[in-house]
Image (spheres, helix red, strand yellow):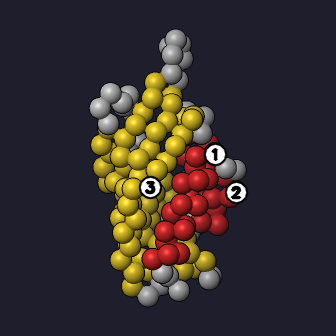
């Protein structure tokens, strides 16, 4: 059964894995496969195969990542939840042949859809609704 606490814990786990660039295989149990749709500013991806391509690209671009969860507001309806997430994201990026890396710091406003599949809580839809950059931040 979905609860506020299970969604809060899931969200913390998700971002901890992103911060340390956990192996991709660690993310797959957290994501639906056939139903998965993820909408990022740079791409819309589908299923585990789409996640793999996106993930392998971003872990080669961004480093020193820190995700700080600011808000997790679920609306639960049985085994389905719509969740508003606000996360502060910080990351460094280096674009060759620039002499220095740049630091991105922003708040990402997201909407997730989650449900129980085969007894496990998973993301079925993950949408980045808006990005608000902090003053002095580099931009994507």
Q: Where does the image place residue 133, in percent across and percent down from the top left?
A: 32, 38
Tell me how far mark 3 sits from mark 1, CA to CA: 15 Å
- The dot on residue 20 is 1
Tell me where residue 13 sits by quadrant: bottom right
Res 111 quadrant in image: bottom left
Q: Is residue 121 above or below residue 57?
A: below
* Of callouts 3 and 2, the N-terminal one: 2
Is 122 located above or below residue 37 in the figure?
A: below
Identify the residue position indicated by label 2 in the image. 25
Query: What number of labels is visible?
Result: 3
Could you tell me which quadrant the C terminus lies in?
top left
Residue 68 x/y as whole percent: 46, 50
Residue 88 is labelled as none
**Residue 69, which numbered label?**
3
**Mark whose residue sits in front, 3 or 2:** 3
Q: CA distance from mark 3 to mark 2?
A: 23 Å
Tell me the quarter of the picture where residue 38 sits: bottom left
Residue 133 in the figure: left or right of residue 97 = left
């Amino acid at each position: 059964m979905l609860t506020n606490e299970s969604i809060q814990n899931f969200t913390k786990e998700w971002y901890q894995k992103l911060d340390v660039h956990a192996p991709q295989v660690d993310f797959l149990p957290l994501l639906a496969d056939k139903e998965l749709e993820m909408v990022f500013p740079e791409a819309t991806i589908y299923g585990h195969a789409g996640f793999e391509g996106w993930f392998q690209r971003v872990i080669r671009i961004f480093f020193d990542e820190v995700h700080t969860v600011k808000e997790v507001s679920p609306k639960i309806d049985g085994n389905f939840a719509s969740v508003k997430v606000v996360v502060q994201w910080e990351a460094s990026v280096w674009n060759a042949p620039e002499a220095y890396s740049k630091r991105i710091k922003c708040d990402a406003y997201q909407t997730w859809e989650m449900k129980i599949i085969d007894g496990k809580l998973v993301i079925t839809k993950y949408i980045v609704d808006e990005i608000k950059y902090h003053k002095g931040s580099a931009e994507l």
